[in-house]
Image (cartoon, helix red, strand yellow):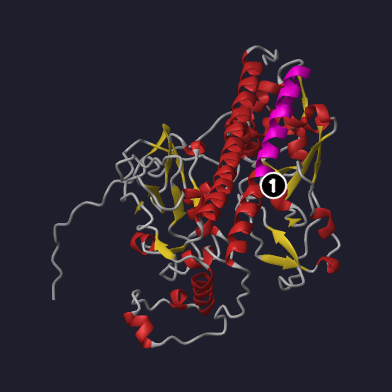
Amino acid sequence: MAIRARLVAPPPQPKQTWPWHTLKHASVRVCQLLSGDRRMEAETYLSCGFSLREAIETQPNGWEPFGDLARVVQPGRLKGILMSSEYGTPFLAATQVFDVRPIPRKFLALDKMETAKDCFVNDGTILVTRSGSVGRSTLAHAPHRGIVISDDLLRVSAKDNRDYGWLYAYLHAPQVRAMTVGVQYGHIIKHLETSHLEALPIPTVDDVTAADFSRRVAHILDLRNEGHRLTLEAESRFEKALGPLRVIDWGDEGFTVKTSKAFFGGHRRFDASVYNPGVIAIRRHLAKHGEGFTTIAEAGYDTWVPGRYKRVPAEDGVIYRDSADLLEVSPDLMKRFADCRFGDDFGGRVKSGWILVPSSGQVYGIIGTAILATEALDNQVVSNHVIRVAPKNGISARVGYVVTALSHLLLGRPLVKALAFGSSVPEIDVDELSKLELVRLKFAEESAIADLAEASAKARADADVLEREIARDAGAIIEHFIARGGKVIA
């Protein structure tokens, strides 16, 4: 059979340009390649942090290496020998240290680990991440006492107490974060060494400026410790009013549920979490020792989540907080999006006095963790994966009490987390949360608990606002130093 020629479309012309991104390029002097670490990674010299560092180091005076003012220590690497919580020493990973309320999930055999004792920290120690998202800094405070802190955090202390506050503020300046990112190394997981931090240039400041930063940083530490103390006191009063409870069976080895409860008890759920025997034991305890129940909706609260929206990155856009950012001190607020109203009548913003509950995530993590919104969130957009619980006029339970009842580690949070459904990424439904029953106490007791919880939230908010202030002031000092040829303008 003869094969006939057919008309076909010509092949497409090869693309002349790279379709995914444009090439970043620049030239550097040989002396820059041969100085310091002799780095051969192009991204080091293309980062804005490299340019900022060059601008400071080219000044003839007015600055010195960070290591001349600070001791930077990296503990020996930990060998993770795990034990049960009953016998082991609690351990916090690097990311957990930034949590407002860090909850250890691992416990170590301290006597079997040579370097573990070097991983305890004192209040006020400056901690800096050295892997992953490098250069984040925070202060060790009350929740970190007596806990093994990951070796993935560098320990920084001042050689002279005069410089303590300025060192901490300097590490929070946006220019310094850029410089730490500029000197990081590694392909998959980025790393920062003690020598990298010690070599960063830090402008010198006068005694008055240094004293002002030290005073404000000390106040941040006091506020965070006070916020933690007030939270513990509120939860202690809540637990004392209801009596102690020890849950023996959390259903780890499985449990059975009657069909009548599963299909006619109101939930009609196939998820086992809502029928967990530990959760049922908590509900029985609250019913026995409390003053009755009321749902969140009956207590006078609206609950909703914003609808879906398109996130459009914009350098001059509004600050955006993911659900994880709400539960951290010193969060990295790097995301900015063009204002698109963000799915609700409030434009994605929240108001002081609202209760915020992350509605998605893993059950051992942030999902179902209630916090109280404060002025620290003003003019910031909060993710639509966070349920808003907003008080209406004439509420019958104050927000401070509701937050405590929802977030108590034993008598509250397990009840909220039990509402989660789904396997890969569990979710909490808004309607389920609005129908969640709150245990009631005597009016005076609820008021006392609310006072403590609301004061705790205010203390933490004040600390966050003050920390943003010192970061902004430190950034202004660095900016003036570069612009004015090495002269520091306090």
Q: Residue at x 57, y 84 (%)?
A: 253
Quadrant assignment for the N terminus? bottom left
Q: Is residue 205 visible?
A: yes
* Residues drawn in magenta: 201-226
Image coords of residue 259 (percent x, y): 36, 87
Q: Amino acid at mark 1?
A: Arg
Q: Secondary structure at mark 1?
A: loop
Residue 235 in the image, given as x and y percentages of width and height: 60, 57
Q: Nearer the viewer, residue 229 or 204?
A: 229
Q: Position of residue 27 (x, y in %)?
A: 59, 28
Instruction: Give left or right: position of 246 versus 361.
Output: right
- Judge whether residue 31 can be spotted in this image: no
189 is higher (above) or lower (below) than 198: below
Mark 1 Cα-neighbour bin, 10 Å: few <14, some 14–19, many ≥20: many
Residue 426 appears at what percent x and percent y? 44, 66
Magenta stretch holds residue 383: no
180 sits left or right of 349 in the view: right
Foreground pick, 88 / 200: 88
Q: Main secondary structure of the magenta part?
A: helix
Question: Which residue does the numbered mark 1 point to in the structure image?
Answer: 130
Residue in view at x 36 percent, y 36 percent:
338
Q: Which residue is at 65% across, 20% downward?
A: 477
* Residue 159 image-quadrant placement: top right
Which residue is rendered at x = 38% and y = 82% of the image? 261
Q: Is residue 111 above or below residue 31?
A: below
